[in-house]
Amino acid sequence: MKIVFATHNLNKLKEVQLLVPSHIQLLSLTDIGCDEDIIEDASTIEGNALIKANYVRNNYGYDCFADDTGLEVKALNGEPGVYSARYAGEQKNDLDNINKLLINLAVQSDRTARFKTVIAFAKAKETQTFTGICNGIITKERLGDGGFGYDPVFLPDGYDVTFAQMSLSLKSKISHRGIAMTKFLSYLNES
């Protein structure tokens, strides 16, 4: 069985391949010759994941899953949300995004936040979504040098280290993406 993971990131593909059952062969967008930039213009995280998965299913004929993730900060009315990757501009720079977030939260006492990942899976006549949420707070400064994105400023509930200070194995177990992937893999194993 072949399934496309809507990504060009080969490291991400290899990481996810280790999680899926051995009878499933994961293909990247590059593997199927999809080199166009799929426009993610939905107003929700779910919508963007569905756009990518359905685009591949409708244009290339493969069953496909895609993920989209956003950081939602309560005091900022859910920002950056769907704009998390480009919060500080189209250059999609992690450092700039964190700087903007910390500036916008400078006078806020409520630093409650959550990461949300949605995996959308499009197959023949059906789409499914799988959501993972990890609650926490935004720290006042960067802590740790692991991970990527907002990891250095996200402290998950019940832990005294940020995602950037955690081992990858621990982060994978408790993170929004890990939770969504677990749900998706359970679905694949039952299918």
Image (tube, helix red, strand yellow):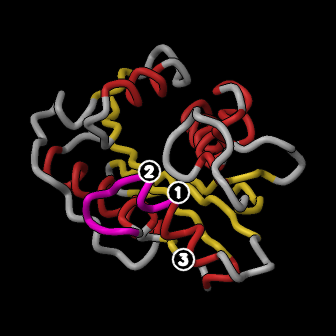
Quarter of the rendering occupied by the C terminus:
top right
Q: CA distance from mark 3 to mark 1?
A: 17 Å
- Residue 117, image x and y in percent? 56, 55
Mark 1 in CB contact with mark 2 (< 8 angstroms): yes
Q: Residue at x 30, y 40 (%)?
A: 7
Q: CA distance from mark 1 to mark 2?
A: 6 Å
Query: From what the image shows, is residue 189 above or below residue 141?
Result: above
In-front residue for pair 161/27: 161
- Residue 92, image x and y in percent? 32, 57
State which quadrant residue 101 falls in.
bottom right
Disc 3 target residue: 79
Dot label at residue 67: 2
Quarter of the rendering occupied by the N terminus:
top left
Q: Residue at x 35, y 38 (%)?
A: 5
Q: Of all residues shown, which one is farthest toward the right?
A: 158
Q: CA distance from mark 3 to mark 2?
A: 19 Å
Local secondary structure at mark 1: strand
Mark 3 in CB contact with mark 2 (< 8 angstroms): no
Q: Residues within 10 Å of mark 3 (few under 14, many from 20)?
A: some
| Residue kind at label 3, given as amino acid type | Glu
State which region is magenta: 88-98
